[in-house]
Image (cartoon, rainbow, N blue to C red):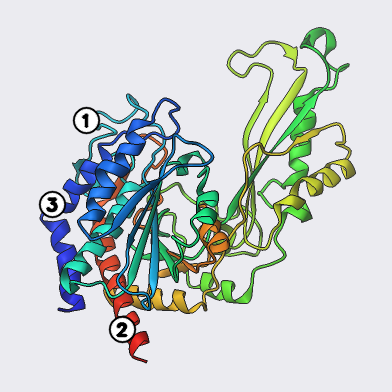
Amino acid sequence: MSRENAIARAEALFDDGKFFDLLSRWVSHPTESQNETCKDPLQTYLTGAITPYLANLGFSCRLVDNPVNPRLPFLIGQRMEGENLPTVLTYGHGDTVLAMDGRWRGGLEPWQVIKEGERWYGRGAADNKGQHAINLAALACVLEERQQLGFNTKVLIEMGEEMGSPGLHQICAAEKEALAADVLIASDGPRIDPQKPTLFGGSRAVFNFDLRLDLRDGGHHSGNWGGLLANPAIILAHAIASLADARGRILVEGLRPAGIPDSVKRALAELEVTGREGPEIDQDWGEPGLSLAEKVYGWNTLEVLAYECGNPAAPVHAIPPSAWARIHVRFVAGCDPDDFIPAVRKHLDAHGFSMIEITPPRETWYPATRMDPDNPWAQWAISSVTKTCGQKPAFLPNLGGTLPNDAFSHVLGLPTIWLPHSYGGCSQHAPNEHLLAPIVREGLQIMAGLFWDLAEKSSDSSSA
């Protein structure tokens, strides 16, 4: 019985094709949460895929109704080995975005995992079925090697993450005792680089708002009225230009973070953002004076997601009566989005744009979260991954994207460790979504080592 043997079991699971077969079965469930007619596959994924797998590992499982959207159930599983043992909570989501049938490259099918070289294609392969499958399979390898894990394990699987996780926070609050743990260890999102094992401890959050200018009813011929009527599209463009400069630097003080904590700066200084397997990075875009890592992991960003005036599909020679834009802010921990709309209102008024209406978001926003790099759980996880991979992983205090991490960090009060098993070029949320086989194999190794080390940590703590 050894750590090396547990990792070897995980390697064999990949090498003999059994993990591929497992993922293929799970991906075959058409779990499109964004499809309002999809109901049975969402429940069947939990009852027909996850529950039997966990039951075989000695877990008790139950489905929990979603108090916000009954179509999107939850599953809670528990394997309890001792009241005095530490408890880990792991999480995943079994729902996917829309399949986008007919838009995948020839030879690919969204609900079938298809290998092409090192790429495993399939909807949900990267986001998130493949990621929680890696974690549960690695847990099974450690259990098989040790016979007993040496710690308690709880599993929470939701089926509405791609809908904004409706009900997740309510379930965490209502099931706080059932989900009580010492740490969350889960997987989602991308590595910083395909070849660099990565950990992160939180996530930036997202806040959307609309800008709109209505000047009159109906359009008017530009030959008769051009030069006489104000053009709302031009005015709105200048208003947006006052929010951020021509290189993307945020100009509204209330949308900028106060700064980057020293411990976070030290952690980000170790990161190299290459953009490998993605678009070429614009080195001079964003907040001046910051490194690439600080721009995407330590700072706020403002983006224009959409802009509309007139009829974009069939323009006519008329001055449009109105213009509209959707603005998007990704923000780090320490920023209060309740302050964003008042700050933008004050800014626009001061710049002569009081006629522009600001509409707050309809959807609910959640707080940004961040783990201090000096947190003992972060240092323990970094040490474990380093031991397995022979190289120190990248540690991000927070992901650049957004996850409902505050449900675990704020509602359940847990330190949170995320280990992504995907990469930035995986085409999640698009046709041709895929996993990279080398990351899958290394992910199985990493998680087997991590769960083994958690058992050893538990043993050391109990004997101390």
Q: Is 161 positioned to the left or the right of 277 in the image?
A: right
Instruction: Indicate the amino acid at tag 1.
Output: Gly
Up the image or down, 214 lies above or below 344; here it is: above
Residue plotted at (38% across, 67% down): 88
**Residue 354 shows in the view:** yes
* Picture quadrant of residue 5: bottom left
| Measured Cα–Cα span from mark 1 to mark 3 | 21 Å
User: Which structural element holds mark 3?
Assistant: loop
Which label number is shown at residue 459?
2
Q: Quadrant of the C terminus?
A: bottom left
Q: Residue 187 in the image: x percent, y percent?
A: 38, 57
Q: Which residue is mark 1?
A: 107
* Picture quadrant of residue 461: bottom left
Q: Nearer the viewer, residue 181 or 362?
A: 181
**Is the residue marked by circle 3 packed among few (<14), some (14-19), or many (20+) residues within 10 Å?**
few
N-terminal-most mark, 3 or 2: 3
Q: Is 181 positioned to the left or the right of 99 in the image?
A: right
N-terminal-most mark, 1 or 2: 1
Which label number is shown at residue 17?
3
Up the image or down, 325 lies above or below 456; here it is: above
Instruction: Indicate the amino acid at tag 2.
Output: Ser
Q: Residue 435 in the image: x percent, y percent?
A: 29, 48
Residue plotted at (39% across, 42% down): 428
User: Which structural element holds mark 2?
Assistant: helix
